[in-house]
Amino acid sequence: MTTFLKQKGGYKKLRVYQVSVIIYDITFYFVQHFLKKGDRTIDQMLQAARSGKQNIAEGSQAATTSAETEIKLTNVAKASLEELLLDYEDYLRVQNKVQWKKGHPRFEKVRAFARSQEISWKYPTLLPKCDDEVLANLCITLIQQATYMLRHLIEKQQEMFLQQGGIREQMSFARSKNKYHNEKFD
């Protein structure tokens, strides 16, 4: 039997998903410790962080039957993280904190840490040791890396769609192939 439904959904292995989990966890800690209770920004930041993570997972799961949905949800994840990026930049600006950019002494250090594999197991113990400026800059760096990876993932998803087509094309091809196979051996 010809199968046309290739199982997808291995999102937990995607580096961008792993980074989005870290972004969510840091954001959860950040809003609990550095924003005032009742501030609407708390819910907005948590929702944007959650949406980034969840839409990567949901898009990956939907890929089995819909390339269109996969691409759309991956783009929603990117847009959500870009919204969260603005929240962190706004926080630093209104709190008169410094956003670290190239040339800042701490920029390269935090960027290297954000790219490393060790961040996955070190960040939970570092959270209580960091102030708001450090955490905001770490999250900004992680978000920039995640949106970069998501842009490339969307490009790859588009290429896959152009090569393999959508579910209807795959179903028609599988049906034709199966019909040809059955006629040939009858």
Image (cartoon, rainbow, N blue to C red):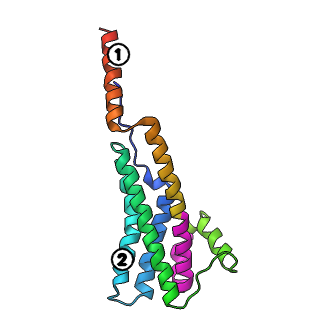
Picture residue at 34% right of the left edge, 44% below the top: 66
Residue 32 picture location, percent across and down: 40, 84
User: Left or right of 112: which side holds 150?
Assistant: left
User: Is 97 contained in the magenta span?
Assistant: no
The residue nearer to you, when weighing 42 against 122, is: 42
Region of the chain picked out in magenta, as a range = 122-145
> What is the count of numbered marks?
2
Residue 121 visible in image: no
Residue 96 picture location, percent across and down: 54, 91
- The amino acid sitting under disc 2 is Gln
User: Is 143 contained in the magenta span?
Assistant: yes
Residue 81 picture location, percent across and down: 45, 68
Residue 109 picture location, percent across and down: 67, 74
Picture residue at 53% right of the left edge, 53% below the top: 152
The residue nearer to you, when weighing 53 against 74, is: 74
- The amino acid sitting under disc 1 is His
Comparing labels 2 and 1, the label whose residue is closer to the camera = 2
Identify the disc placed on residue 169. none
